[in-house]
Image: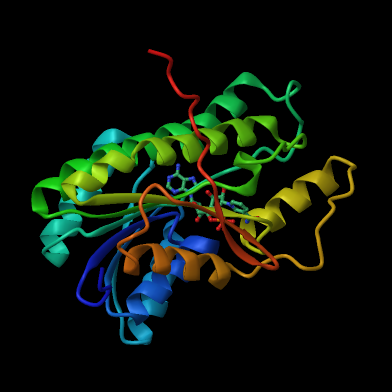
Amino acid sequence: MEISGKAAVITGGGSGIGRTTAQALAKEGAAVMIVDLDDRMGNEAVELIGKSGGKAAYRRADVTNAEQMRRVMEDTVAEFGRLDILYNNAGIAIAHPIYPKTPLEKWRRVLDVDLQAVLLGCQLGYEFMAPRGGGVIINTASMAGIYPHPIDPVYAAAKGGVVHLTFSLYRWARRGVRVNCVCPGIVRTPLLERIAAEITAAGGKPALPTNALTPDRIADVVLNFIRDDSCVGQIVEVRPSGPHVVDPPRAPKRRS
Ligand SMILES: NC(=O)c1ccc[n+]([C@@H]2O[C@H](COP(=O)([O-])OP(=O)(O)OC[C@H]3O[C@@H](n4cnc5c(N)ncnc54)[C@H](O)[C@@H]3O)[C@@H](O)[C@H]2O)c1
């Protein structure tokens, strides 16, 4: 799909990977609706895009709230005249204490934001895109959703859910809605800095790699998903050495 002239919704677009992807899409000529809970960061992202000649707007919405997210989709169509791209990217993690010591309300919030909100986003995205000729949905999971991640098993479970959700939505392409998923390794963003600060405050030693990725490496994968119409139900992990397509698990053959 050509990016220029399209309209995109990006959740968590105020910061980190979401902001960088919003800037990259705007640079390619898409109008971008930034969704976040942090008004300062969301408005700043819009300002930056505007200053470089791009088109963007900001809506405060919680990705776990169905009414707020429906309004975001409606506002995008009202403001930009269309909705072609949805990037379900907002996410949080538990830095401390590690599960099972994590309080119930804290790990439930991680499942809500990192998994249930992606289900909600996909549902709304399909509802808005399928009758309008289709579009592209991209989800941010994590390499923690593919490989064991003992320092945050709840995050791993949520992101593993996003990976399998994406694998399982390939049939939506029949209605023109392609769903793909990017699984970043460690990326230098405010999220990473917050986690490191929380671990340090709790007396631990955060192990931050020296070769952490920059957010533009993830944005490149997202833009490729949009451009390449053959990407359907694809999971791409991003390591410092580069992006890599993850083979889908094969179901055993049924005996008749
Ligand atoms: N940074 C990494 O190392 C890394 C690695 C793998 C995956 N990821 C994933 O990438 C995504 C983006 O992470 P990031 O590192 O850019 O983080 P970030 O904290 O820099 O940005 C995330 C944004 O999401 C917003 N947000 C959080 N909860 C929200 C909610 N309920 N509703 C609306 N907005 C909300 C935050 O306000 C923030 O602006 C997340 O899904 C994260 O899990 C990050």
Which quarter of the figure is the N terminus placed in? bottom left
The picture places residue 169, in percent across and down from the top left corner, at 34, 38
Residue at 57% x, 70% y: name it: 217
The picture places residue 87, in percent across and down from the top left corner, at 37, 55
- Give the camera-side residue of 185 and 80: 185
Which quarter of the figure is the C terminus placed in? top left
Q: Is residue 186 left or right of residue 16?
A: right
User: What colour-coding does the image apply?
Assistant: rainbow
Q: Vertical placement of 207 versus 20: above or below?
A: above
The picture places residue 70, in percent across and down from the top left corner, at 22, 42
Q: Is residue 240 left or right of residue 28?
A: right
- Give the camera-side residue of 228 and 184: 228
Q: Is residue 64 visible?
A: no
Residue at 29% x, 71% y: name it: 56
The picture places residue 13, in percent across and down from the top left corner, at 43, 60
Residue at 34% x, 66% y: name it: 228
- Give the camera-side residue of 144 and 92: 144
Q: Is residue 122 left or right of residue 18?
A: left
Q: Is residue 201 left or right of residue 220?
A: right
Name the image quarter holding residue 77: bottom left
